[in-house]
C-alpha cells in the first residue's frame, strides 16, 4: 500500500458505500459469475479482508448491496383517486428498474444457480414484491372506501398483478427501460378495468 493509498483510506459508512458501489459496478458490467470479492475490494480501494470481515460470500455481499441501494418501499399517499395512486406506485417502480440497481437485479435474474436463486428470491420477496403487494392492497382498500374500486376487488390475488406485470416486463425485455407510457397503459388497460366499478 502506498502512502497515497493510506491517505485516502476510507472507513465505516464511507467504505461500505464504496464497496456497495463497486459491487453494483461489477454486477452491471460483468454479471454475477464474473464478480469476485477480490475485484470488488480492488475497485473499492480496500483489502479483501475488509470484505470477508463483513460478508462470508459474494451472495451475501450482493444482497446487502442491493438492499442498501434499492429505494425503500413507502406508502403512496391518498391522492383522491385510485388511478393516480396506482400510477404513482408503478412510476416509482419503473424508475427503480431503469436505474443501476435495477440493471444489477436484471443481471442476477438470468445467471445465478438454483441455490443462489433461492436466496435472491427470498430477498426480492421480502424487499420488493411483498411490500409492493401491500401498498397495492392499501390503495385498493382506499378505493373501495372512496367508491372508485368495486367491493371485493381489494384482494391479495388482485394486488399481485402489479408486481407480476412489472417483473414480467423486466424479465421479458431484459435491461431495456420501461416505455414512458408503460405505467399509464398498465393502469388504464389492465388494473382499472379489473378493479373499477
Image: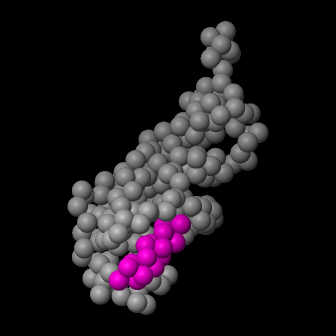
Q: If the image is split into quadrants, where does the N terminus sit?
A: top right
Q: In this view, does 99 lie above or below 113?
A: above
Name the residue: 54% across, 70% down.
130
Q: Which residue lies furthest to the bottom in this view?
A: 152
Q: In this view, does 19 lie above or below 187?
A: above
Where are the magenta residues, as a range? Answer: 131-147
143 vs 183, left or right, is right
Q: Nearer the viewer, residue 190 or 41?
A: 190
Q: Is residue 168 visible?
A: no
The answer to whether residue 68 is visible is yes
- The vertical placement of 1 against 116, above or below, is above
- Residue positioned 65% across, 24% down in the render: 10
In the rendering, at what x and y percent does residue 185 appear? Answer: 24, 69
Q: Where is residue 51 in the image (x, y as percent from the top left)?
A: 70, 38
Snapshot quadrant of residue 126: bottom right
Q: Is residue 32 left or right of residue 92?
A: right
Residue 73, given in percent of the width and then of the height, sits at 52, 59
Amino acid at each position: 500500500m502506498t502512502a497515497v493509498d493510506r491517505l485516502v483510506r476510507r472507513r465505516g459508512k464511507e467504505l461500505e458505500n464504496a464497496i456497495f458501489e463497486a459491487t453494483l459496478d461489477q454486477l452491471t458490467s460483468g454479471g454475477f459469475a464474473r464478480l469476485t470479492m477480490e475485484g470488488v475490494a480492488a475497485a473499492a480501494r480496500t483489502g479483501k479482508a475488509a470484505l470477508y470481515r463483513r460478508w462470508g460470500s459474494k451472495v451475501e455481499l450482493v444482497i446487502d448491496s442491493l438492499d442498501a441501494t434499492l429505494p425503500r418501499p413507502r406508502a403512496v399517499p391518498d391522492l383522491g383517486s385510485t388511478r393516480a395512486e396506482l400510477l404513482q406506485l408503478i412510476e416509482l417502480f419503473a424508475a427503480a428498474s431503469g436505474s443501476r440497481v435495477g440493471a444489477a437485479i436484471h443481471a442476477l435474474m438470468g445467471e445465478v444457480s438454483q441455490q443462489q436463486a433461492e436466496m435472491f428470491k427470498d430477498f426480492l420477496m421480502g424487499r420488493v414484491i411483498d411490500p409492493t403487494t401491500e401498498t397495492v392492497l392499501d390503495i385498493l382498500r382506499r378505493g373501495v372506501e372512496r367508491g372508485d374500486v368495486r367491493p371485493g376487488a381489494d384482494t391479495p390475488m388482485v394486488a399481485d398483478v402489479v408486481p407480476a406485470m412489472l417483473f414480467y416486463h423486466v424479465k421479458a425485455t431484459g435491461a431495456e427501460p420501461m416505455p414512458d407510457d408503460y405505467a399509464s397503459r398498465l393502469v388504464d388497460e389492465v388494473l382499472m378495468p379489473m378493479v373499477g366499478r
